[in-house]
Image (cartoon, helix red, strand yellow):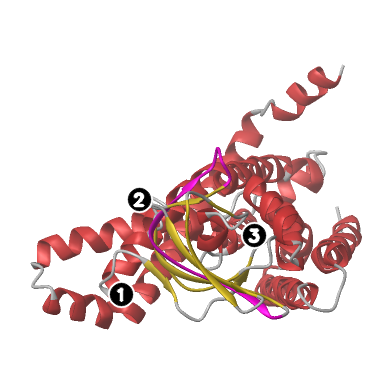
Amino acid sequence: MIGRRLLDLLRFDLLDRHVARTFLASLGVVFLFFFGFFIVIDLFANAGEFVETAQKLSIGARTMAGWVAGLYLYKSPAIFLQVAPFVTVIGAVVAVARLNRQNELVPVLMSGRSIFRLLRPVFVLAAVLTAMMLLVQEHVAPAAADQRLARACFLKDRRDTLLLKHAQFEDAAGRHWSSLELEPISGRLVRAEVRRVSGEAYEIIDLADATFDAARGGWTMAGGIPALIEEGGARHELRLELLESDLTPARIAAREKEPFDLSFADLGHLFAVTGEPRFEVLLHFHVTFPLANLLLLLLALPFVLRYDRQKVMQGFAVAFFLCLAYFGVDAALRTFGETRLHPILAAWFAPLFFGALGISLFDGVRT
């Protein structure tokens, strides 16, 4: 029964296909604009560093162009995730405005089809885009993140490693890690300073060219790990075969990654290990952000579904500012969720509030 209803929902007639084509055409144009705009802005912001790297390392223009193109290729999944909700809502608004300009809305309503039924293809395609966002967010973007970080390190800092000089980590054993340098792709720890102080006892370990053994749950070095331990006035120099720690390469690299670079599984593991509210907020954000595709449609479309074409632009402006308000409130609450608010409240307040507002506005559309 449910399967039949789902098939009926996905079965498009001639008018549905016309609306879907109009929406997809607008979606494609808007996506190319936002995607290109994002890349151009980012490219101009970093062009100076790219040119400086090419000059200092004597890299040819063609080779450098290939490296830069690779950087943005690996960055494209994260860009897609960031612009997708904007693209969906603006594409839908443009499509509805186009139908209205071509005098196609009123004849459809006069034929007995409601405005809700007319826009069903838009919501179905927005739901498909939401599913695509979830797949890219969980599988594609995290897989591309390490390659992007590696290329960014080379192009901006002329290094092959992530340098986290000012980052501080603490593992479950109470050791403090600092001055870390990590290869993002291989996970090799080029160097790190590890310290532990307990009363009058302290432990000093300097890692160099260390690798993480996931099966044994710790770091290893060729020839062993030198450690200096002082306790009760006695100093001992040891060589450890394994430095057990829950500080993994993924946890170190996560400090430099953007929210979309981490999969749901990665965030769950990081939150379980660290207990940091930031990772719990991002866990919920990975669900709420794709839902913005549908929520923003409910917010924006009521303001452009006006049969007086002179008021369409006014409605478009109101819809645009409502969407900006949604993302502004959502970003502010997520920031507070890392320090003051409960993570669930911080992540879900904006979607629930604006979603309820959108349903109310959409229900009031004159049909």
Towards the viewer: 278 or 177: 177
Towards the viewer: 257 or 34: 257
Label 2 environment density (alpha carbons within 10 Å; few <14, some 14–19, many ≥20):
few
Q: Amino acid at mark 2?
A: Ala
For marks 1 and 2, give the CA distance: 31 Å
* Residue designated by label 2: 222
Q: Magenta stretch?
A: 200-217
Which residue corresponds to the image point at 30% horizontal and 75% vertical from the top-left? 157
Q: Amino acid at mark 3?
A: Val
Labels 3, 1: front one: 1
Return the disc, 3 or 2, that comes first in the chain's sequence: 3
* Residue designated by label 3: 89
Secondary element under disc 3, as helix, strand or loop, is: helix
Q: Quadrant of residue 198?
A: bottom right
For marks 3 and 2, give the CA distance: 55 Å
Secondary element under disc 2, as helix, strand or loop, is: loop
Label 3 environment density (alpha carbons within 10 Å; few <14, some 14–19, many ≥20):
many
Return the disc, 1 or 2, that comes first in the chain's sequence: 1
Q: Quadrant of residue 119?
A: top right
Q: Indicate yes or no whether the magenta region holds residue 210.
A: yes
Which residue corresponds to the image point at 71% horizontal and 45% vertical from the top-left? 123
Q: Is residue 333 left or right of residue 103?
A: right
Labels 3, 2: front one: 2
Percent across and percent down for residue 300 are: 73, 64
